[in-house]
Amino acid sequence: MSIKKGIALTNEEFFFLASLFKCNALIGVPDPFIGYWLEEIETEMKRAAKSLVHKGYIVYKNNDIDIMPELLEYVKICTKTNMTLWIQSEQEGQEEESYFYLNARKVIESRVSENDDQLSYLLQERGNPAQTWREIVQAMLPEEKPIVYEGIITLPLDTFTDLLEERHYYNLQQIEKTLKAKGVPAKVAKVLAHSIKEYKYRGRISSFYHMENEFRINSLYVLCTEQTNWVARRVERQFEELVEIRSVSLSQFLQEMDDVITRAKKPAARMM
């Protein structure tokens, strides 16, 4: 298989490979064996190893495992990194999801797909962190739009995410009513409700920064419509998870994107 086309792994294969390295957690790869008995896990791990052998990714030699050099490098970066980026986007009904694992010189992208509840990953080598970050920002970069509200709208995080995820089940009036009930001014609630219901592009970027035994996480939601561009920054106040929503200019958007990285490295950032 050509490396330029990427290395395809199932959830079980990726989990098996990660288990060969000492890491507390591999962001983006859930444990596929939760709820299994120990004997069942051993059987499934052997099945994953056999599948990797069949693909030519690993070879057993004298009770040891040789991993294809490119794959070995990829998995080392994924398991040893202290910075992982998670990007989700939706545009015109097309959804994409990727994880980016960074080290000082190189970035490995893991593009996620799901078929019949089965997760699979396509690992690809990207450029250096600076180059990859420019490409991520460019991919999420909206067109310049007017600022429709100069203030900051504060909502409970679960209210905001529920309206976005379940917008098909709410009509415009219900979304607007919910926003007003949370203290959003009437005129702004009408515009924001329309943006939630009829957005052109929706994105989310989260940074996971691993320092010693602590994971610091920071997230930014992006909502683009024909009228304006919104960003929603996750914050925590008095143990309550909130989002601060702003209508932003292009320069403000770029600053918010950069802050996703810098805020994750600050001790004040907390787990989502």
Image (cartoon, rainbow, N blue to C red):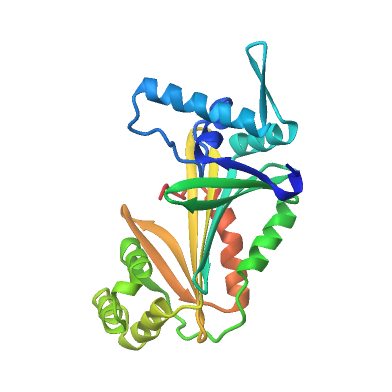
Q: Which residue lies furthest to the front in this view?
A: 54
Using the image, determine if residue 40 lies above or below residue 199.
above
Name the residue: 38% across, 69% down.
164
- Indicate the quadrant where residue 55 lies: top right
Using the image, determine if residue 253 lies above or below residue 39.
below
Name the residue: 67% across, 38% down.
74
Residue 4 location (% of width, % of height): 76, 48
Q: Can residue 267 be seen in this view?
A: no
Name the residue: 57% across, 25% down.
20
Question: Residue 187 vs residue 138: left or right?
Answer: left
Q: Which residue lies furthest to the bottom in this view?
A: 187
Question: Residue 24 vs residue 61: left or right?
Answer: left
Question: Residue 235 vs residue 209: left or right?
Answer: left
Between residue 209 and residue 28, name the one nearer to us: 28
Quarter of the picture holding the N terminus: top right
Q: Is residue 240 visible?
A: yes
Numbered disc total: 0
- Indicate the quadrant where residue 96 lies: bottom right
Name the residue: 46% across, 46% down.
118
Question: Residue 60 vs residue 176: left or right?
Answer: right
Using the image, determine if residue 217 lies above or below residue 152.
above
Residue 171 location (% of width, % of height): 29, 80
Between residue 46 and residue 240, name the one nearer to us: 46
Residue 199 location (% of width, % of height): 46, 78
Residue 58 location (% of width, % of height): 66, 27
